[in-house]
């Protein structure tokens, strides 16, 4: 089977990375998988409002995911939706293990992520951007988080599905992975697959995450190593 | 031991989660953590080794208050026995009456006659833990600014602006004929002849802090 643009099963789309794209923020980054582009900006650690939300033993991590209205071919309604709230929560949970939250009691770390162009794989692109932005913001971390999704088209596995491929695939498994301590922080699955396939796809994802991690490192170093 | 020390490259750029060294001969200092036998960095920064303690100097990020730091802050509110000071950190700082040099009788004096809302002060951080930051004016350097201008740079770039034992800030003071007070939180107070030149230098430090030859560039201005 041939994939679009002659990609092999374990090829991901062209990756674009940039650190420090939002000068006003404490840290920021842009991450793109092919046509999918996400921008993340980090503010904080700062005061928590409303005050009852604050925790005296650790910081809150608040990730807000949203897609800008022009990111899709049909205008996407601005503001929070069921989908964006869910992805925001999933990203928060995937990033929390990577941060030393206990170092910032009674504070909040705000991570605002906007997808400016969507072509499938937005949550993984958003996560990659957010993880780089957090490092850029000088937040204490156990390591960077890299993320990618893979699925199965027909009988073959395919990494990093783009929009048209995703419509044809039986399932889609996004994974977020911390290469520094070899831990998975996000695992989701859309669709239906036998156990064997799931394990294979997760392994495919992990290998790709390690490559993405390498690119994230290079981008961060390029920004600061002058 | 001596041979192992050379393995660590001082001033090398490091990212969070990256291993600095796998050895139990060293201790993790600021912004580092140990897991098993290895020491890892917590932050994006530069490795700094002193004797056997490894620490990482962060290159970016918001100001994290530390006891003993001199900071510049603006009075944002007055309470019954102290002032709330905005020091551009995550949390507001508090200057209690006990932190002021002279004795003030709250029954007789209006606190706003000492420091009014909007006044800018140069103060020392007495203690900082979590959201509680206590300031003190009981330091020879501490004072209230009555005139002059303020500038803001990233707090991570303050050490670069000050330089080794104040060599850089001395040069800036000489060049601009300005009196300058730098707060560790990134706020700078300055007053003097060539204030525009001072602003130019602060901007340059902000943009080119990690580059070599900044001192030469400034002395040429």
Image (cartoon, coloured by chain):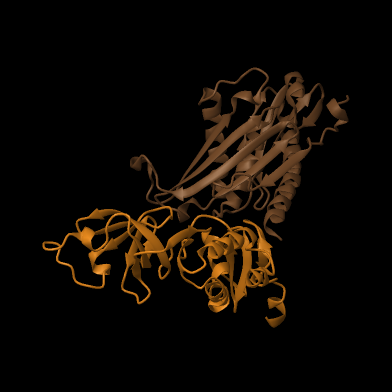
Chain colours: A brown, B orange
Q: Residue furthest front?
A: B193
Question: Image quadrant for the N terminus of chain B?
Answer: bottom right
The answer to whether one can see residue A69 in this image is: yes
Q: Residue furthest bottom?
A: B2
Left or right of A112: which side holds B187?
left
Q: Is residue B169 above or below residue A23?
A: below
Q: Is residue A123 above or below residue A131?
A: above
The answer to whether one can see residue B34 in this image is: no
Q: Who is closer to the viewer here, B63 or A65?
A: B63
Residue lying at 59% horizontally and 79% vertically, measured from the top left: B51
Residue lying at 50% horizontally and 64% vertically, measured from the top left: B195
Quadrant in the rendering for residue A186: top right
Left or right of A99: which side holds A221?
right
Q: Position of residue A204 (x, y in %)?
A: 76, 38
Question: Image quadrant for the C terminus of chain B?
Answer: bottom right
Residue lying at 52% horizontally and 23% vertically, measured from the top left: A82
Q: Position of residue A94 (x, y in %)?
A: 58, 40
Q: Residue furthest left?
A: B107
Q: Position of residue B159 (x, y in %)?
A: 55, 68
């Amino acid at each position: 089977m041939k994939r679009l643009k002659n990609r092999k099963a374990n090829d991901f789309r062209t990756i674009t990375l940039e650190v420090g794209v939002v000068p006003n923020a404490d840290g920021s980054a842009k991450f793109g998988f092919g046509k999918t582009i996400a921008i993340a900006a980090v503010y904080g650690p700062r005061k928590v409002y409303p005050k009852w939300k604050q925790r005296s033993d650790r910081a809150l991590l608040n990730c807000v995911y949203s897609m800008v209205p022009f990111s899709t071919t049909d205008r996407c309604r601005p503001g929070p939706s069921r989908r964006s709230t869910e992805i925001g929560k999933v990203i928060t949970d995937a990033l929390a293990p990577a941060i030393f939250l206990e170092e910032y009691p009674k504070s909040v770390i705000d991570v605002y992520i906007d997808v400016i162009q969507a072509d499938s794989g937005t949550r993984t692109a958003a996560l990659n951007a957010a993880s780089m932005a957090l490092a850029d913001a000088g937040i204490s971390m156990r390591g960077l988080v890299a993320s990618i999704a893979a699925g199965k088209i027909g009988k073959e596995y395919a990494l990093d599905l783009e929009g048209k491929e995703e419509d044809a695939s039986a399932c889609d498994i996004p994974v977020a992975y911390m290469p520094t301590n070899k831990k998975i922080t996000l695992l989701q699955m859309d669709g239906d697959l036998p156990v064997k396939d799931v394990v294979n796809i997760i392994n495919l994802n992990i290998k790709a995450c390690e490559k993405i991690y390498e690119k994230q490192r290079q981008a961060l170093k390029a920004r600061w190593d002058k | 031991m001596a041979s192992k020390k050379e393995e660590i490259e001082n001033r090398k750029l490091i990212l969070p989660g990256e291993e600095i060294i796998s050895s139990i001969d060293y201790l993790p200092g600021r912004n580092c953590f140990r897991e098993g036998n290895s020491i890892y960095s917590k932050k994006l920064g530069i490795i700094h080794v002193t004797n056997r303690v490894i620490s990482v100097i962060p290159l970016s990020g918001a100001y994290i208050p530390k006891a003993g730091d001199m900071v510049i802050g603006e009075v944002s509110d007055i309470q019954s026995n102290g002032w709330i000071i905005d020091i551009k950190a995550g949390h507001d700082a508090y200057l209690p009456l006990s932190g002021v040099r002279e004795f003030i009788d709250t029954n007789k004096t209006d606190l706003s006659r000492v420091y009014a809302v909007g006044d800018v002060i140069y103060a020392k951080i007495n203690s900082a833990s979590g959201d509680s930051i206590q300031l003190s004016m009981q330091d020879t350097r501490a004072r209230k600014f009555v005139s002059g201008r303020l500038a803001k740079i990233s707090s991570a770039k303050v050490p670069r602006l000050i330089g080794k034992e104040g060599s850089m800030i001395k040069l800036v003071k000489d060049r601009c004929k300005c009196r300058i007070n730098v707060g560790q939180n990134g706020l700078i107070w300055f007053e003097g002849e060539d204030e525009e030149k001072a602003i130019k230098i602060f901007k340059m430090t902000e943009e080119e802090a990690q580059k070599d030859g900044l001192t030469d560039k400034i002395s040429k201005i």
